[in-house]
Image: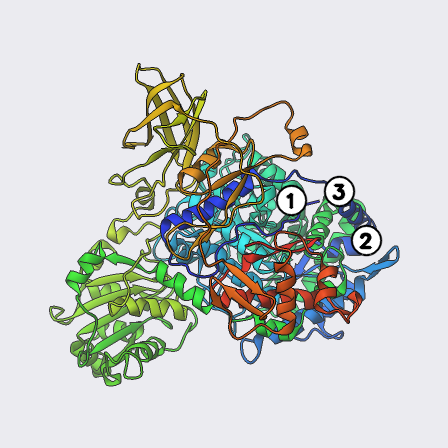
């Protein structure tokens, strides 16, 4: 049974992102300390395992096999007479994929309510067909309802209308911020789960270490970046955000295992081959998956629930036989070889593996190589299950590309595939064993979402879905500004010297857009950029340009003019270009083979047909930043990247053009046109002053001890961000007579700490180094201090860390906490106190007696407090400011009750009885209570606080933590 997670004690912040780097590092370190230092011992969930055993044993053969299947369908009819209802009823399918392209999601009107009605209808069909008894109670097998939501609108986001427009992964990567990753995941989890979606096909954690401009399978904006450690850290933060935002009602599926980034073509069209050794894969492609799969009892929310296996071949690392594997999704030995690696074996035992879509052209072409002209759907399904996938997406299940209608062509093959699974189950013991193992994983995943598998746990309120949607615009605006990147010239100072101001009336501005010519579909209206520029900077905005001075042409129109400059049909384009003082190139996808007009700007820069001396040429990348070469970049006055086409990104790009914001982001991938290299960028900055400190004591008054704790950092990279987690730091401690000791430690959020042997009383010199970067020597005197006594509970109040309103809670370090983390926390400025182990913890620790952590006296608690609830005046104050408008009666009763019991777990029934004293527990649904808690969290956030004040503890209740 896979472990359940409860929200981390240190959730990612939801507001106030423009904080000093030091505070972000400290906040991240809080999570590290709580995970590593004070994690409770795991407890076997025997009751849940027993229920899982009974649930699996109760399944018929048809149910066992149907639960392994994910299907799509057309339209939004989920009535009992619909085709999808028949699949659920007659074939017992266990999962459904909903997409906008199939018309399941209607992105107009009240989309959240429409989606909620759709998911409720699907779950009702599942309830009617799988309901059963377990003693005196009744349960059913709810559907996994999945969708893609990778951000950046269409095509990788299915639900857009009325929902928060979140960015793609590359934009998050450009912020180098786990907080932004977690906040984005939280928004996605909160908004989609409120509408009944319970499985997110994401995040993508593929590493893009070798970008390829112009197609060829480049994963581009879908990746967090080119550094494996950062891709994993951001992916884990995103997963944590999804889990916390959804309140545990959404599964995440990390993709595309074992890694798509090194492939040279799209897996949708052909099976690519990655020619890397296992060691190379573990250093790059596999590393982010190992991070999101990492089991951590105190950070279970950061562990993904599932992984999607890709249709990619790899060098045969198992030895013998063919030099390359089959597609991993269809190769049992190869997939098992990956899953048996130490970094994945424990995770696999309790979690879900699903295949990528089994009907994509790449799979069909692979089997065609074996002389099978038609799509061998039965073979494909069996091979995928036997290879090791638990959940099988029967999507794009057609034989003839000319006849791909879902009802007439795909539905019969879906049905036939399930029937073939039933036949194989009856005749093949190996298939039967694998199917029985897979269905246990599937049912366990559903129990993780809904512990009682009861309908009232599953159904959602359409009104709540509407209320929950579209609440993250301000957070996405802050993220967009933090991601905004200056690619050319190299520094903001150079930019200000080259462009002291932005466009001013009556200068003409010409926008060259690619929304139609760079994609196989129009992604937004032609004049969208023009309209948004005028809204912000025209007469109705900051009044810097006039409406008549801003115009737009397309890449196609530019391309036609370049091909035939004298053609009268292109005269308007020629005049617009000639009159323009500012030319803004809106760069998007570049696919010269499939979309020739997408190369128009490159051709213009190579051979401009007009005099450019009196023009400022500006490029803004609304996609990847590496399509222009160095010569083309050199002809631009400025080159920015916003990485996506959401409104927040568009606004950030214009703000940079007009000089209203200074770009703060840095590309997370290589940009050949500016000679920017990520591997170099994440190295420690050579000019920084590396600091080393003694843990918990003044260096000139260290108590007499056999060991001394040292902490170094924060270690920053060349972009000013923390170096990747795991960067090696070396420590030395040298006595004046030459006796020395040394140790090494790895960084967490730029900080590292280690314990070194001390050779008696005397004067020492402490130092730390990271590669060629060396700290200033620190003079240390041992023997002048005294042993401090532990600080008793309760914990001190939060202490201000940056002199302003930013706060991080005190940390309770158990005696015996990992020294490196404890020292790193103290050296970074965290105030620590010691908490003794319980008797059970002492017994578990055995005879080992660790070196006691020193006590640092807490600073006086600052005012105002993070949260204050006044029972007499019925007012709520967040960081000293009153929450307005006042909370409703139910909201206030709930918050006050939790506030008066802060730090204690309050059960659901107890909370219901207090908030609704006249109602019986059975008369108040869990959905109603969850909705009320969600709304109180939102009110706290709106007033300047954080959602993490109210923590959901799965199976227990809620706890207020401030």
Question: Spatial distance from mark 1 to mark 2, Cα to Cα?
Answer: 21 Å
Q: Quadrant of the C terminus?
A: bottom right
The answer to whether residue 120 is left or right of residue 673 is: right
Of the residues under marks 1 and 3, which one precedes in the sequence? 1
Q: Which residue is denoted by mark 3 in the rendering?
A: 433
Relative image position of residue 838 (x, y in whole percent): 66, 35
Relative image position of residue 862 (x, y in whole percent): 44, 53
Q: Which residue is denoted by mark 2 in the rendering?
A: 59
Q: Is residue 573 above or below residue 394?
A: below
Please name whichever residue, 697 or 31, is drawn nearer the observer in this view of the structure: 697
Of the residues under marks 3 and 2, which one precedes in the sequence? 2
Q: Is residue 949 visible?
A: yes
Relative image position of residue 726 (x, y in whole percent): 43, 37
Question: Spatial distance from mark 3 to mark 2, Cα to Cα?
Answer: 14 Å
Q: Which residue is denoted by mark 1 in the rendering?
A: 388
Q: Nearer the viewer, mark 3 or mark 2?
A: 2
Q: Is residue 426 above or below residue 662?
A: above
Of the residues under marks 1 and 2, which one precedes in the sequence? 2
Q: Secondary structure at mark 2?
A: loop
Report which quarter residue 420 is drawn in: bottom right
Tell me the number on the disc at residue 1.
none
């Amino acid at each position: 049974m896979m472990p359940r997670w409860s929200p981390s004690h240190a959730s990612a912040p939801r507001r106030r992102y423009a904080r000093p780097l030091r505070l972000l590092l400290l906040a991240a370190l809080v999570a590290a300390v709580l995970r590593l230092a004070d994690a409770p011992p795991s407890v076997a969930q025997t009751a849940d395992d027993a229920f899982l055993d009974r649930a699996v044993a109760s399944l018929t053969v048809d149910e066992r096999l149907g639960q392994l299947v994910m299907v799509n369908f057309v339209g939004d009819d989920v009535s009992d007479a619909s085709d999808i209802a028949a699949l659920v009823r007659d074939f017992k399918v266990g999962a459904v994929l909903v997409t906008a392209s199939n018309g399941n999601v209607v992105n107009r009107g009240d989309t959240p309510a429409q989606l909620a009605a759709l998911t409720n209808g699907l779950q009702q069909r599942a309830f009617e067909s799988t309901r059963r008894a377990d003693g005196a109670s009744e349960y059913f097998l709810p559907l996994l309802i999945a969708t893609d939501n990778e951000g950046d609108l269409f095509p990788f986001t299915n639900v857009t209308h009325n929902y928060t427009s979140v960015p793609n992964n590359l934009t998050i990567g450009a912020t180098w911020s786990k907080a932004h990753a977690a906040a984005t995941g939280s928004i996605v989890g909160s908004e989609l789960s409120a509408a009944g979606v319970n499985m997110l096909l994401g995040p993508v954690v593929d590493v893009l270490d070798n970008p390829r401009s112009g197609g060829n399978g480049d994963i581009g904006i879908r990746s967090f970046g080119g550094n494996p450690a950062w891709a994993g850290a951001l992916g884990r933060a995103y997963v944590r955000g999804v889990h916390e935002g959804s309140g545990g009602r959404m599964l995440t599926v990390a993709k595309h295992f074992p890694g798509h980034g090194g492939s040279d073509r799209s897996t949708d069209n052909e099976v690519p081959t990655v020619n890397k050794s296992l060691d190379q894969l573990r250093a790059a492609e596999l590393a982010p998956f190992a991070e999101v799969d990492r089991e951590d009892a105190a950070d279970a929310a950061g562990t993904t629930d599932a992984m999607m296996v890709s249709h990619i071949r790899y060098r045969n690392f198992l030895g013998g036989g063919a030099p390359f594997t089959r597609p991993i999704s269809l190769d049992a030995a190869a997939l098992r070889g990956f899953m048996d690696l130490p970094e994945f074996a424990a995770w696999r035992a309790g979690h879900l593996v699903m295949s990528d879509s089994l009907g994509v052209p790449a799979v069909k072409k692979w089997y065609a190589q074996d002389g099978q002209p038609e799509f061998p759907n039965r073979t494909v399904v069996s091979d995928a299950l036997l290879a090791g996938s638990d959940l099988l997406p029967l999507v794009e299940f057609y034989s003839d590309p000319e006849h791909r209608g879902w009802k007439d062509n795909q539905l019969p093959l879906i049905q036939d595939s399930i029937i073939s699974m039933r036949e194989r189950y009856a005749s093949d013991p190996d298939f039967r064993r694998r199917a029985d193992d897979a269905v246990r994983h599937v049912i366990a995943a559903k129990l993780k979402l809904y512990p009682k598998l009861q309908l009232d746990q599953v159904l959602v309120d359409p009104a709540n879905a509407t209320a929950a949607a579209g609440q993250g615009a301000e957070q996405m605006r802050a993220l967009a500004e933090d991601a905004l990147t200056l690619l050319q010239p190299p520094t903001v100072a150079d930019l200000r010297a080259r462009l002291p101001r932005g466009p001013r009336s009556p200068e003409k501005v010409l926008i060259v857009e690619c929304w139609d010519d760079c994609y196989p579909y129009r992604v937004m209206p032609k004049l969208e950029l023009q309209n948004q520029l005028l809204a912000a900077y025209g007469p109705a905005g900051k009044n810097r340009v006039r409406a008549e001075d801003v115009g737009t042409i397309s890449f196609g129109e530019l391309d036609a003019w370049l091909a035939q400059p004298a053609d009268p049909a292109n005269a308007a384009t020629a005049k617009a270009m000639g009159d323009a003082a500012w030319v803004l190139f809106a760069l998007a996808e570049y696919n010269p083979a499939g979309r020739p007009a997408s190369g128009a700007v490159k051709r213009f820069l190579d051979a401009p047909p007009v005099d450019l001396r009196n023009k400022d040429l500006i490029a803004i990348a609304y996609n990847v930043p590496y399509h222009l070469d160095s010569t083309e970049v050199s002809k631009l006055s400025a080159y920015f990247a916003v990485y996506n086409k959401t409104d927040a990104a568009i606004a950030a790009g214009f703000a940079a053009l007009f000089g209203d914001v200074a770009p703060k982001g840095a590309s997370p991938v290589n940009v050949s046109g500016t000679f920017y290299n990520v591997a170099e960028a994440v190295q420690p900055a050579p000019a920084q002053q590396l600091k080393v400190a003694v843990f918990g004591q003044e260096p000139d008054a260290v108590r007499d001890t056999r060991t001394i704790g040292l902490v170094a950092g924060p270690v920053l990279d060349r972009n000013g961000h923390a170096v990747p987690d795991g960067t090696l730091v070396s420590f030395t401690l040298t006595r004046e007579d030459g006796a020395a000791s040394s140790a090494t430690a790895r960084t967490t959020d730029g900080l590292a700490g280690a314990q070194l042997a001390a050779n008696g009383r005397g004067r020492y010199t402490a130092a730390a180094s990271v590669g060629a970067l060396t700290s200033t020597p620190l003079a240390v005197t041992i023997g002048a201090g005294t042993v401090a006594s532990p600080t008793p509970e309760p914990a001190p109040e939060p202490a201000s860390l940056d002199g302003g309103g930013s706060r991080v809670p005190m940390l309770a370090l158990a005696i015996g906490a990992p020294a490196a983390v404890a020292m790193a926390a103290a050296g970074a400025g965290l105030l620590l106190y010691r908490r003794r182990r319980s008797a059970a913890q002492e017994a578990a620790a055995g005879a080992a007696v660790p070196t006691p952590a020193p006590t640092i006296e807490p600073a006086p608690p600052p005012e105002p407090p993070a949260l204050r609830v006044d029972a007499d005046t019925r007012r709520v104050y967040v960081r000293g400011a009153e929450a307005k408008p006042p909370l409703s009666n139910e909201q206030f009763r709930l918050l006050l009750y939790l506030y008066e019991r802060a730090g204690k777990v309050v059960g659901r029934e107890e909370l219901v009885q207090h908030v609704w004293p006249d109602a019986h527990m059975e008369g108040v649904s869990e959905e109603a209570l969850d909705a009320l808690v969600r709304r109180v969290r939102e009110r706290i956030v709106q007033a300047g606080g954080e959602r993490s004040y109210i923590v959901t503890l799965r199976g227990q209740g809620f706890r207020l933590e401030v």
